[in-house]
């Protein structure tokens, strides 16, 4: 298969790797920030300098490292694309120092088309440019909106070695890698911007195994690290030998530079002699670390000095507080108890115990006066009308106003604390408990929140800033969940048990199952119809919700784009 647009590298005076049959490749698992061209360039330079100290020949960076990924419509701004090109050219000049060459990603305008590109810089020049051929347009990806698809690529020449550079999605089918193998590539180096969701690392491994089997070539998979709005990139960069065995493994949820040594055997096949062998976390650890990393980067990259949240004595706010402390440290987390007449002494005690266990500042701001003031001013309009959820929502909105006032006064971002179960069925108040800047548990079902609370009390992975031991009081985990907006209220007054609700929602949201298919899982048709109706009519609320970490394969947002005005109901 002959590649279109095949480019031949320019001559480089650096020593040829082919003469020695040995190559040292540094894999830079970086955390760029979208739009921060200067900051990202500095990270690229620092990684190259570290690689040079280790005598590396080449540094591989993640997809679109220079611009940050995903840049979305930012790349439609000519000034931004021009600045990216200027930064690439500056980096290219610096490679004239005899140090390692680099493969770096950037948006690249050529002949009127904008591409998602990987550029090989060496010997003071841009030696070759390769364009992403397969643009993803599903799930959270929308690259066909922003980029032109490149031609099938051929290999690039680097100091006597022919390297294939498929970009991220290019390896999720066989065409691009097949083309590279047939045109002489010796080793596949893949820059990636692959976001996290549960069990994603295993999916990537299976895809890479398939490409190695088909091409007979070893492959290096370099993935981005860090939070970008709702997406979290977990790193986990790795390599496979040509025989499909693991060549090296970098950690998830941590930046780093891996030095890998490759040697060409007697049959001309490149083999990895040495590299790191990190152990990947289990699913609970990965989910918790994803939520922590997403919150940490959202707060830090957007310049907030810390966070504030309402600590109610319930499970959701307790888990969010623990995640915030793990992400930012206790000195940057401020908890506020906002009691009203329905707030139990048990909740007040639980909230205080949670704040004490986490070592965070804890203040109490009663909401009785503002809630009752609302009641007085609305009394003439509401005269004769029965008390209903309107009055309950006033409590939630009073709390929201107070938290936003504290945020405005001191600059701390409000952490939103609603889980996916409640957001699915609208069990949340607009301009009340839905207030805030970011929600670390937005994509966790209620049963997952309980499970992770128990898990965190028994585990503290490396890199977290919170304390060891029980950080969420046992009573918060075991007591009956309630919003405490009226006397003796429990969540199950309005909703089925959360294990039932979450199973139905998983069928409706994650799997797009029909009502009949969900009924076969042991749920009543009447209940499924009710949950489906609540799911649809809450779409307008979700459109106004703050962003939050994507953890499941299908989060609310880019993954699931349902209309707000929607009369369809599955009555089959």
Image (cartoon, grey):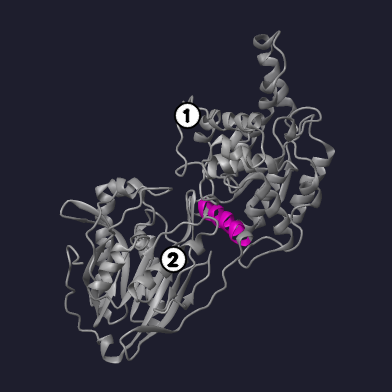
Q: In which quadrant of the rendered image does the N terminus lie?
A: bottom left
Q: Is residue 253 left or right of residue 352?
A: left
47 or 156: nearer the viewer: 156
Using the numbered discs, state the Cα–Cα distance from disc 2 to disc 1 in whole angstroms.
38 Å
The verdict on residue 292 being magenta is yes
Outermost residue to the right: 345
The verdict on residue 535 being magenta is no
Q: Point out the frontmost of discs 2 and 1.
A: 1
Residue 232, position as x, y percentages in the image = 50, 55
Q: Is residue 404 in view?
A: no
Residue 472, position as x, y percentages in the image = 75, 53
Q: Answer above or below: position of 533 versus 463.
A: above
Q: Is residue 147 in view?
A: yes
Element marked by disc 1: loop
- The circle drawn on residue 564 is 1
Residue 519, position as x, y percentages in the image = 62, 37
Element marked by disc 2: loop
466 or 131: nearer the viewer: 131
Answer with mark 2 or mark 1, whichever residue precedes in sequence.
2
Residue 412, position as x, y percentages in the image = 58, 46
Residue at image position (30%, 68%) is 165
Magenta residues, start to end:
285-299
- The residue labelled by disc 2 is 30
- The image quarter in which residue 312 lies: top right
Residue at image position (42%, 79%) is 243
Please tell me how crowded label 1 is: few (under 14), some (14-19), or many (20+) other residues with Cα within 10 Å: some
Q: Answer above or below: position of 25 versus 502.
A: below
- Total labels: the figure holds 2
């Amino acid at each position: 298969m002959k590649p279109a647009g095949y480019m031949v590298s320019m001559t480089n005076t650096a020593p040829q790797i082919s003469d020695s049959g040995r190559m040292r490749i540094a894999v830079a698992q970086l955390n760029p920030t979208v739009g921060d061209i200067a900051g990202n360039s500095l990270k690229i330079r620092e990684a190259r300098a570290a690689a040079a100290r280790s005598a590396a020949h080449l540094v591989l960076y993640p997809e679109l490292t220079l611009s940050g990924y995903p840049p979305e419509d930012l790349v439609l701004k000519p000034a931004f694309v021009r600045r990216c090109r200027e930064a690439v050219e500056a980096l290219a000049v610096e490679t004239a120092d005899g140090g390692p060459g680099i493969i770096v990603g950037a948006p690249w305008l050529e002949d009127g088309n904008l591409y998602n590109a990987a550029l090989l810089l060496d010997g003071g020049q841009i030696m070759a440019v390769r364009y992403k051929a397969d643009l993803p347009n599903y799930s959270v990806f929308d690259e066909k909106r922003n980029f032109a698809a490149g031609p099938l690529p051929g290999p690039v020449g680097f100091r006597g070695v022919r390297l294939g550079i498929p970009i991220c999605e290019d390896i999720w089918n066989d065409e691009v890698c097949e083309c590279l193998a047939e045109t002489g590539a010796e080793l596949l180096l893949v820059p990636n911007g692959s976001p996290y969701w549960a069990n994603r690392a295993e999916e990537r491994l299976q895809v890479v195994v398939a490409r190695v089997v088909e091409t007979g070539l070893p492959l290096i998979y370099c993935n981005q690290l860090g939070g970008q709005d709702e997406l979290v990139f977990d790193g986990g960069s790795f390599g496979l030998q040509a025989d499909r065995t693991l060549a090296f493994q970098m950690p998830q949820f941590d930046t780093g530079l891996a030095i890998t040594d490759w040697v060409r055997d007697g049959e001309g096949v490149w083999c990895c002699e040495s590299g790191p062998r990190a152990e990947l976390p289990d699913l609970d650890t990965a989910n918790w670390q994803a939520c922590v990393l997403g919150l940490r980067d959202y707060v830090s990259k957007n310049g907030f000095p810390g966070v504030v949240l309402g600590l109610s004595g319930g499970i959701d706010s307790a888990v969010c507080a623990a995640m915030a402390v793990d992400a930012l440290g206790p000195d940057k987390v401020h908890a506020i108890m906002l009691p009203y007449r329905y707030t139990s002494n048990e909740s007040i005690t639980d909230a205080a115990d949670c704040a004490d266990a986490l070592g965070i500042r804890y203040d109490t701001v009663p909401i009785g006066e503002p809630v009752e003031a609302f009641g007085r001013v609305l009394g003439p309009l509401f005269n004769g009308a029965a008390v209903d959820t309107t009055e309950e929502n006033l409590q939630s909105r009073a709390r929201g106003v107070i938290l936003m006032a504290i945020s405005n006064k001191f600059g701390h971002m409000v952490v939103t604390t609603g889980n996916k179960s409640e957001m699915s069925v609208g069990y949340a108040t607009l301009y009340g408990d839905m207030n805030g800047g970011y929600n670390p548990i937005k994509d966790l079902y209620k049963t997952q929140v309980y499970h992770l609370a128990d898990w965190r009390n028994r585990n503290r992975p490396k890199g977290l800033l919170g304390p060891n031991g029980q950080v969420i009081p046992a009573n918060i985990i075991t007591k009956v969940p309630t919003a405490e907006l009226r006397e003796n209220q429990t969540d199950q007054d309005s909703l089925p048990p959360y294990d039932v609700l979450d199973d139905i929602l998983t069928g409706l949201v994650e799997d797009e199952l029909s009502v009949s298919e969900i009924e076969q899982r042991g749920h009543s048709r009447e209940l499924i119809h009710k949950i489906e109706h609540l799911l649809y009519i809450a779409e307008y609320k979700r459109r106004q919700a703050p962003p939050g970490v994507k953890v499941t394969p299908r989060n609310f947002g880019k993954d699931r784009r349902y209309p707000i005005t929607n009369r369809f109901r599955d009555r089959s």
